[in-house]
Amino acid sequence: MEVLGIDIGGSGVKGAIVDTETGKFVTDRVRIDTPQPSTPEAVIGVMKEIVDTLNYSGPVGVGFPAVVLDGVLMSAANVDQSWISYPGQQKMEERLGCKVTLLNDADVAGIAEMRFGAGKGRRGVVMIFTLGTGIGSSMFVNGRIVPNTELGHIYLPGQPLGQDAEDVTASSVRTNEDLSWEAWGGRLNVYFNEIEKLFSPNLIIVGGGVSKKYEEFFPYIKVRAELQPAQLRNKAGIVGAALAAIGEGM
Ligand code: BGC
C-alpha cells in the first residue's frame, strides 16, 4: 500500500508517501518548519499543507513527541503545552479529512526499525532510542510494542533532582555544551547501563541523526546487550508512521 507518514518534531514537520511493502518513499519528502508557537491549530495547519502538496487522500500515520493514549496527547516535552489533553487524532481527522493514526514519535520510529532496519526479525526484548533534541524510546517484546515508554525522562543516579536523563544525554546537549565524543559517550554509558538494569534488553538500537556517527561514541558504551546503530535514520519516523497507519507493530 502507499500510505502517507508524517513526523512531527520540535523544528520540522516532515511527510512522504511510503510504499509499506518496501519501506521506500514513493514521493519526495516534504518538510515545513514547525510553527512557533507550536500550537495544535498551527501544527495541524502545516499537516494540511503537506497532505495538499502531496495531493493525498487515504490513511495517515503521525508520529508526535508526546505520550499518546487513544489518540489523545498526555504530555508535551518539546512542543507547545496546549497539546496536553488535546484530542489530537480526532482534530487531525476533522481537518485533513483522512483517517489518522496518531502515536508517539519514537514508537513509530521503532516500528520502522523492527520491520525494515536493525530490529528486523528480532525476538525477545528490543529497545530503540532516538537521540535528538530529547531522547525517545520504544520497546518491543517478540515484535509487539509496549507503547509510550518515555525513557528519556528517567532519573539518572547522581543527577540533580528534577532533571531528566535527556537533559544531560540528548544529542542536543552534546552540541549545546560542545562535549567531546568521549564525554558524551560517558554520559550515554551511564544512561544505557541504567536502562539495562531496569529492562535487560537483548538488543539496543540507537537512532536519531547522530547515529550515523555511531563509531565515535559506541566504544564508550559498555553494556551486555547487543548494541546496533539504527539503519533507517531520519526516514524512520515517516516510514514507521505510515506502517502504524495500517496497524503494524501494534
Ligand atoms: C518526549 C517523547 C519523545 C522524545 C523524542 C521526549 O522529550 O517526551 O515523547 O518521544 O522526546 O522526540
Image (cartoon, rainbow, N blue to C red):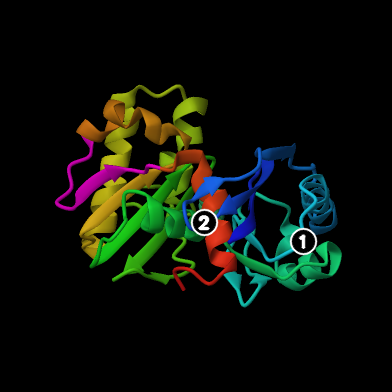
Q: Which mark is residue 211?
A: none
Residue in the foreground of this view, choosing between 66 and 154: 66
Q: Where is residue 24 shown, x and y percent of the image?
A: 52, 46
Please tell me whether mark 2 or mark 1 is closer to you in this view. 1
Is 165 placed above or below 68 here?
Answer: above
Give the structural element (helix, strand or loop) at label 1. Answer: loop
Query: Which residue appears farthest toward the left when viewing the image?
Result: 224
Task: Please give the name of the residue rendered at 42% of the width and 60% of the height, measured from the top-left corner.
Answer: 138
Could you tell me how far apart the alpha carbons at marks 2 and 1 are, in whole angstroms? 18 Å
Residue in the foreground of this view, choosing between 82 and 91: 91
Q: Where is residue 17 shown, x and y percent of the image?
A: 64, 50
Amino acid marked by disc 1: Ser
Is 142 placed above or below 220 here?
Answer: below
Task: Please give the name of the residue rendered at 66% of the width and 38% of the height, measured from the top-left corner.
Answer: 28
Task: Please give the name of the residue rendered at 23% of the width and 39% of the height, measured from the top-left corner.
Answer: 221
Is the CB of the residue bearing disc 2 within 8 angstroms of ligand 1? no
Asked if residue 60 lies left or right of residue 91, the reply is: left
Q: Name the residue under label 1.
A: 57
Q: Where is residue 239 shown, x and y percent of the image?
A: 53, 52
Amino acid marked by disc 2: Gly
Q: Does the magenta stretch include residue 66?
A: no
Q: Is residue 229 magenta?
A: yes
Q: Mark 2 points at which residue?
A: 240
The stretch in magenta equals 220-231
Q: Can residue 64 be seen in this view?
A: yes
Residue density around tag 2, few if under 14, some if 14–19, many if 20 or more, within 10 Å: many
